[in-house]
Amino acid sequence: AEKRILQSEKLALAGEIAAGVAHEIRNPLTAVSGFIQMMNEDKESPYYTYTQIIHSELERINLIIGEFLVLSKPHIDDVKKLSITNVCLTIATFLQFEFQSKNIQFTQCIPQDDYFILADENQIKQVLLNILRNAIEAVHDNGRIELSLHANDDHSVTIQLKDDGIGMDAATLAQVFDPFFTTKENGTGLGMMLTSQIIRSFNGNICIDSSKEAGTTIEITFPIIE
Ligand code: ADP
Ligand code: MG
């Protein structure tokens, strides 16, 4: 058990450092991206091939840095009483385009009652977007994704996300939270690490049930506050 605590402390520290670095890199990166986009407009330029490559590589850096920016804000300031019901109800609108372009059957089962948790809204949204994105990337065309919410007897609330996608074997599942672990060609391997860190920082829990070809169910539980 001792070993495990040390490991998670190390991960948390690595996340903090990475977030700080990401924050510092963001501004110069925005400037460079702007200029490259301008140069890219000149298709006659002898450097056109190069500016195109620079542009796409910068996008890649942006993607990686984007995963960290959520943590770069000091958490404590934004922590407040938050209706998790509301967040769940609105989150899917961010992904409408992705659902449509892959013909995904998305359903949600969210109760009328407001359940409140103590957390930072943007970070909780980031968590839901991370796991929803993974679900979208895991399902085949016409796949199914189901988001639901329910309260438990012990004053906690559970968000459940179910997909019928490619699923994970035991070896993959064991590494899911490891930084930079990815099975995707263009993955960053940072989404699930950040997701678990955010959930833990608000006294929540994440539990994954998955098997190869059968799909994945993720349950995230938070204590309810009055
Ligand atoms: P990335 O999405 O950039 O690969 P993540 O940290 O979000 O990084 O996920 C890590 C790995 O966990 C993924 O590459 C994938 O192998 C696995 N994974 C996560 N969610 C799912 C899911 N819903 N279905 C199947 N595999 C998943
Ligand atoms: Mg991901």
Image (tube, helix red, strand yellow):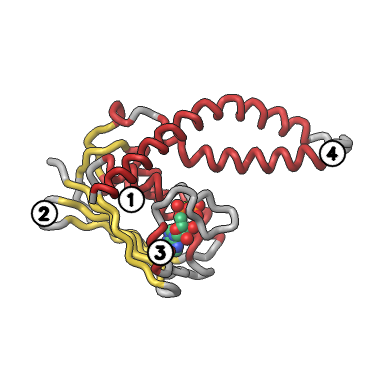
Query: In which quarter of the view is residue 87 placed?
Result: top left
> In whole angstroms, how far apart are the C-alphas of marks 1 and 4?
44 Å
Say which residue label 3 marks: 145
Q: Decide: is 147 above or below 60.
A: below
Of pointers 3 and 1, the one earlier in the residue sequence: 1
**Closer-to-camera residue (83/19):** 19
Give how far apart the Cα atoms at labels 4 and 3 are: 42 Å
* Residue 112 placement (x, y as % from top left): 22, 53
The reply to whether dot 2 and dot 4 touch (C-beta < 8 Å) is: no
Sequence-first disc among 1 and 2: 1
Helix, strand or loop status at disc 2: loop
Helix, strand or loop for disc 3:
strand
Dot 3 crowding, Cα within 10 Å, few <14, some 14–19, many 20+? many
Which of the two labelled residues, at mark 2 and mark 4, occupies the earlier sequence position?
4
Point out the frontmost of discs 1 and 2. Answer: 2
- Residue at the spot 41% in from the left edge and 58% down from the top edge: 175
Q: Residue at x 52, y 49 (%)?
A: 188
**In the image, is 140 to the left or to the right of 3?**
right
Tag shown at residue 89: 1
Q: Is residue 135 visible?
A: no
Image quarter hosting the C terminus: top left
Observer-nearest residue: 48 or 179? Answer: 179
Tag nearer the camera, 3 or 2:
2
Numbered badge on residue 43: 4
Q: Which mark is residue 154?
A: 2
Foreground disc of the pair 3, 1? 3
Q: Residue at x 39, y 71 (%)?
A: 211
The answer to whether 162 is drawn above or below residue 19 in the figure is: below
Query: What separation in Å lies between label 1 and label 2 (alpha carbons)?
Result: 23 Å
